[in-house]
């Protein structure tokens, strides 16, 4: 816990948005589990973010950015340090629109589906594949989010970054190391926002592609329960992780109030009141059984942080 009142008061001075101490992370993650974080701060602009990062670094307090919390599992013991929510950095605008092309610049805290909607309303095609991915723009870029044959890297043009000293730089796509479900960035680097390239498209075609994807997702994914999306990355050169888990009969297995979804083998659902430990136990079980039966190492896509 952040015991020092001076640090607490300083954080409240630096950040005009909310500063929540000993905040249960179950309220800030889509899967709805997680112990308390020492502090969860919501900077309202780049200046506040920069000063906060520099101050935390000066005090040697661990910190980490968080977007919409849809790919994070915080352990039951919580997180010792400060989680920096990017949610209040959330403006976006269309730039450089001409007859064929346009760009959208979006701050990291913009909800991805809002950008998908803005693009669709303006007949801009390029990120329809992101429809239904519930993350933020920053989280999607960091995770190189993807679905239905597309990845965020396909649409990114440049990104703005802030380092641990609070300094801002821009990086073009060609200099960025995008990988499967990851953008490799130096330790502590925060994505401030990104510019995305679009083609002018036909509005009906864009809308119908989005509708089609949302319907497919609703059929395949257990959206009626809290979850964190795909738990595992798909192993290279193999069938998808969910299919392997399904073949081994692991769907429906429970630990406490968590369960490997009967609808999709790569989803673990919170049936209500699950603990992070229940979910992590199921992750370990699936990894063990897949290794024993198939000799395949499953790697988690979700980020597990904090203490037991
Ligand atoms: C129902 C459901 C469906 C999903 N479907 C898909 C899918 O089809 N495809 C897919 O790829 N993912 C999917 N996901 C997972 C998740 O939505 C994506 O990974 C999303 O991009 C994560 O964004 P976030 O803002 O929630 O990130 P968070 O969960 O908040 O953070 C994820 C990671 O990104 C880092 N991060 C967040 N913001 C920043 C920033 N500004 N700068 C630097 N690092 C940052 C965090 O530190 C953390 O390591 C799904 C999740 C759910 C719940």
Image (tube, rainbow, N blue to C red):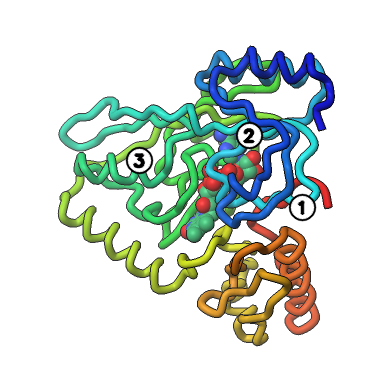
Identify the element where label 3 is drawn.
Answer: helix
Q: Is mark 2 within 8 Å of ligand 1?
A: yes
Identify the element where label 1 is drawn.
Answer: loop
Marks 1/2: CA distance? 19 Å
> Looking at the image, do the residues carrying marks 3 and 2 touch, with CB atoms under 8 Å apart?
no
Which comes before the other along the chain, label 3 or label 1? Answer: 1
Q: Residue at x 24, y 46 (%)?
A: 120
Query: Where is residue 72 shown, x and y percent of the image?
Result: 64, 50
- At label 1, counting other C-alpha atoms closer than 10 Å, the crowd grade (few under 14, some 14-19, many 20 or more) is many
Point out which mark residue 146 bears. Answer: none
Q: Which residue is mark 2?
A: 65
Query: Where is residue 110 shown, x and y percent of the image?
Result: 43, 36
Does 157 appear above or below 135? above
Query: Where is residue 60 shown, x and y percent of the image?
Result: 82, 22
Point out which mark residue 76 bears. Answer: 1
Which of 201/306 is in front? 306
In the figure, is residue 55 to the left or right of 91? right
Which comes before the other along the chain, label 1 or label 2? Answer: 2
Which of 205/257 is in front? 257
Q: Which residue is mark 3?
A: 115
Does 195 appear above or below 259? above
Q: Residue at x 64, y 57 (%)?
A: 301
Marks 3/2: CA distance? 20 Å
């Amino acid at each position: 816990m952040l015991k020092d009142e001076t640090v607490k008061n300083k954080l409240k001075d630096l950040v005009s948005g909310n500063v929540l101490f000993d905040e249960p992370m179950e309220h800030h993650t889509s899967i709805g589990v997680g112990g308390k974080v020492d502090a969860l701060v919501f900077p309202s602009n780049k200046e506040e973010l920069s000063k906060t990062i520099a101050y935390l670094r000066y005090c040697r307090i661990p910190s980490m950015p968080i977007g919409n919390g849809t790919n994070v599992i915080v352990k039951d013991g919580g997180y010792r340090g400060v989680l920096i929510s990017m949610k209040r950095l959330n403006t976006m605008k269309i730039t450089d629109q001409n007859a064929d092309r346009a760009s959208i610049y979006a701050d990291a805290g913009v909800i991805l589906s809002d950008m998908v909607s803005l693009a669709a309303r303006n007949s801009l095609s390029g990120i329809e594949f992101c429809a239904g991915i519930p993350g933020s723009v920053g989280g999607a870029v960091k995770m190189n989010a993807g679905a239905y044959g597309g990845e965020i890297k396909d649409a990114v043009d440049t990104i703005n970054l802030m380092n641990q000293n609070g300094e801002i730089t821009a990086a073009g796509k060609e200099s960025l190391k995008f990988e499967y479900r990851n953008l490799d960035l130096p330790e502590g680097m925060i994505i401030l926002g990104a510019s995305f390239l679009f083609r002018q498209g036909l509005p009906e075609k864009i809308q119908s592609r989005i509708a089609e994807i949302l319907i497919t997702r609703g059929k395949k994914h257990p959206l009626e329960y809290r979850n964190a999306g795909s738990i595992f990355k798909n192993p290279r050169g193999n069938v998808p992780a969910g299919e392997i888990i399904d073949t081994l009969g692991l769907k429906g297995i429970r630990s406490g109030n968590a369960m490997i979804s009967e609808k999709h083998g790569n989803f673990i659902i919170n049936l209500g009141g699950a603990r992070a430990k229940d979910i992590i136990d199921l992750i370990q079980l699936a990894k063990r059984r897949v290794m024993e039966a198939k000799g395949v190492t499953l790697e988690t896509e979700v980020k597990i942080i904090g203490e037991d």
